[in-house]
Structure formats: structure tokens, C-alpha cells
Image (cartoon, grey):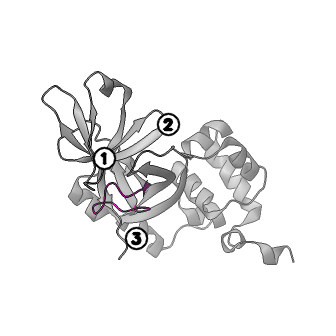
Amino acid sequence: MADENKSEEQQTIDETGFTERLRSLIGASSARAFAHKAGMGDSTFRNILNGALPRLDSLLRIANAAGVSVEWLATGKEPTKSDSQFEEEFALIPGYNVQVAAGHGSIAGDEAPTRELAFRRKWLRFRGFNENDLALVFAKGDSMEPTISDNETVMVDTSERKLRDGHIYVIRNGDHLLVKRIQTLWNDGVQLLSDNKEYPPQEISSSDLETLEVIGKVVWVGKDL
């Protein structure tokens, strides 16, 4: 009965050799350091290291952090040609369970990756993106309508942190994450603009800009039709 309750991804894991392979990947490094590299909680990773079977998202994070295939990590088998072709054609961009407010403000949530979406490497190169600089978050609110709708996924390029006129950025102000369009001002300040004109602009003086942290520029929005 216990085996029947296992999830599909757990059933495909070679339990006997998985822990041995995982320990070999850690090598001389500490479990804490490897967990941090994989974007996982220390207690979660130690449970896996001590024999608990990982969920699929944890398996992906460990494989990505170690630079090995998921198939080899789970089963000890080398990836098939189709798996290699997938990795050559697609990059897995991490998604975070974080809401950026397209409204009056939203508290940042847990900033460990919770999912991954596949994007063609050819498209990423065409856009000039480095996959390691990209992150996916959720928009919350309607102030950026119609450009960004409530609960839509947005891709942020974290290498783009210099505010440029007319572009949309994710900005942290204390515990709040905002997504706004930028208008630079003559006095070196900026205005945070909402594409929904029912929301007034927010002016930030040049002195107050020091309190803001630019997370990155919004470069893609996932639209549901």
C-alpha cells in the first residue's frame, strides 16, 4: 500500500543509488552550501540526503546546481539523445512564488524557486538574454493593465538595473515589490507610472532613489487568452 501512495516522480527514482549519487555531487562541499546553491532550504535538503525521496521540483534544482541530468540523478542512467536535445534547445528559467504589485504594493514572499518554465535558447539569444540573469514572478493587481494583468507571469532580467525612461521595472521598497513603468525627471528623480490611467503617478526624488532597489527590467509577459 505504501508504494501505491508514492507520487509518479518518486516511483521513477532509484532509491538505492540516489543518495550515493547525491553525496558524490556534494563532494568536499558542505550540505548547507550545496542546498544554498540549489536554492533549497537546509532542512529540506538534509532530509533528502538522509533518505527522503525528493519532489520533482527539488530534483530539478539539485540537477541544475550540480550540472547533471535529471535522469542520471534519479536513475543512474545517462540521458537519452532526446533528453540531450531538449537541454540543447531549451533553457529552464526559475519561477518564484513572489507577487510583484501592479497596484498599491505587495509583500515579497518566499524567494526560493518553486517552478521552472522552458524557453527556447534560440529566442533567448535573439533577445540578447543571459538565462542565468532571468527570473519569473507573478504580477498582482490591475494598475499595469492592459500591459500586465492580475496574476500574469512576468520575466525579469536582473542584469538590467539602470532605470531607463519608458521601460518597466520591478522595484523593491522595503518589504514591497512594485512593477511600474519609469519616467525620468529633469531633477534626477523618477516617476513610477501605471499603464492603467486610473492610478496616479508616484514621484520619487533623487534623494529617495537611494532607498529603492531595482530588481530588474520586465522583458516578457505571459498572456492567457
Is disc 3 surrounded by few (<14), some (14 to 19) or many (20+) residues within 10 Å?
Answer: few
61 left or right of 53?
A: left
119 left or right of 62?
A: left
Instruction: Identify which amino acid the numbered label 1 is placed on.
Output: Lys
124 left or right of 69?
A: left
- Of helix, strand and loop, which one carries label 1? strand
Dot 3 or dot 1, earlier in sequence: 3
- Of helix, strand and loop, which one carries label 2? loop
- Alpha carbon distance from label 3 to label 2: 41 Å
Residue 18, position in %: x, y? 70, 59
Labels 1 and 2 touching (C-beta < 8 A):
no
The disc at residue 85 is 3
Q: Single out the residue that lies furthest toward the top.
A: 207
Residue 57, position in %: x, y? 59, 60
Of helix, strand and loop, which mostly describes the magenta segment?
A: loop
- Of helix, strand and loop, which one carries label 3? helix
Residue pictured at 36% horizontal, 62% vertical = 149
The disc at residue 175 is 2
**Highlighted magenta segment, given as a residue range:** 138-152
Residue pictured at 78% horizontal, 50% vertical = 50
Residue pictured at 32% horizontal, 62% vertical = 121
Residue 82, position in %: x, y? 45, 75
Instruction: Identify which amino acid the numbered label 3 is placed on.
Output: Gln
Is disc 1 surrounded by few (<14), some (14 to 19) or many (20+) residues within 10 Å?
Answer: many
Labels 3 and 2 touching (C-beta < 8 A):
no
Dot 1 or dot 2, earlier in sequence: 2
